[in-house]
Image (cartoon, grey):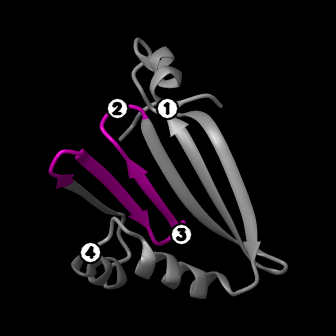
Amino acid sequence: MSTVLQTKWIVSGVIEAPVQNVWEVLLETHPHLSEQDRQTIKGSSQLFKITHREAGQGRTHLEVDKQQRSIAVQGEWWYRGVYRLEPHPRGTLLTYSVYNVAPPVSRWMVSLVQGPE
């Protein structure tokens, strides 16, 4: 998934809980991770990558980086969403960033299908 990233939106907030606790909850509740995926992630320190194919919805590519405490979800054309956790004086800073990863020739079309900003 090495594509030039063009940020569309970023939102963040503080969760008043330790980073490790928030990370565990994020893994347990993320809708694109199966129980088998979760077990593989917990048992390894390597970058976890997998592609899921859902009928009528295309492929969803996932990257889970335990070291960086990030989960990236990418579709087949323009969408890439990244959750990142960082320590914060009050607990954990959760940042969610959405990127336009469409090829340059079709990047302009994204605003036609994803709605107004």
Q: Spatial distance from mark 3 to mark 1, Cα to Cα?
A: 28 Å
Residue 50, picture quadrant? bottom left
Task: Give whichever of discs 3 and 1 has the lower sequence position.
Answer: 3
Q: Position of residue 8 (x, y in %)?
A: 61, 35
**Tag on residue 114?**
1
Which residue is at the far top? 105
* Sequence-earlier tag: 3 or 4: 4
Q: Secondary structure at mark 4?
A: loop
In the rendered view, tell whether residue 21 sits above or below residue 110: below
The residue that disc 4 covers is: 34
- Residue under numbered circle 2: 77
Amino acid at pointer 2: Trp
Q: Which residues are magenta?
A: 53-78
Dot 4 amino acid type: Ser
Callout 2 touching callout 4 (CB < 8 Å): no
How many residues crowd around disc 1 within 10 Å: few (fewer than 14), some, or many (20 or more)?
few
Specify whether residue 77 is painted magenta.
yes
Label 1 or label 4, whichever comes before in sequence order? 4
The residue tagged 3 is 69
Front in this rendered view, residue 53 or 70? 53
* Of marks 3 and 4, the one in the foreground: 4
Q: CA distance from mark 1 to mark 2?
A: 12 Å
Residue 61 higher or lower than 107, as above or below:
below
Q: Residue 75, percent across and down?
A: 34, 43
**Element assignment for label 3:** loop
- Pick whichever of labels 2 and 4 is earlier in the sequence: 4
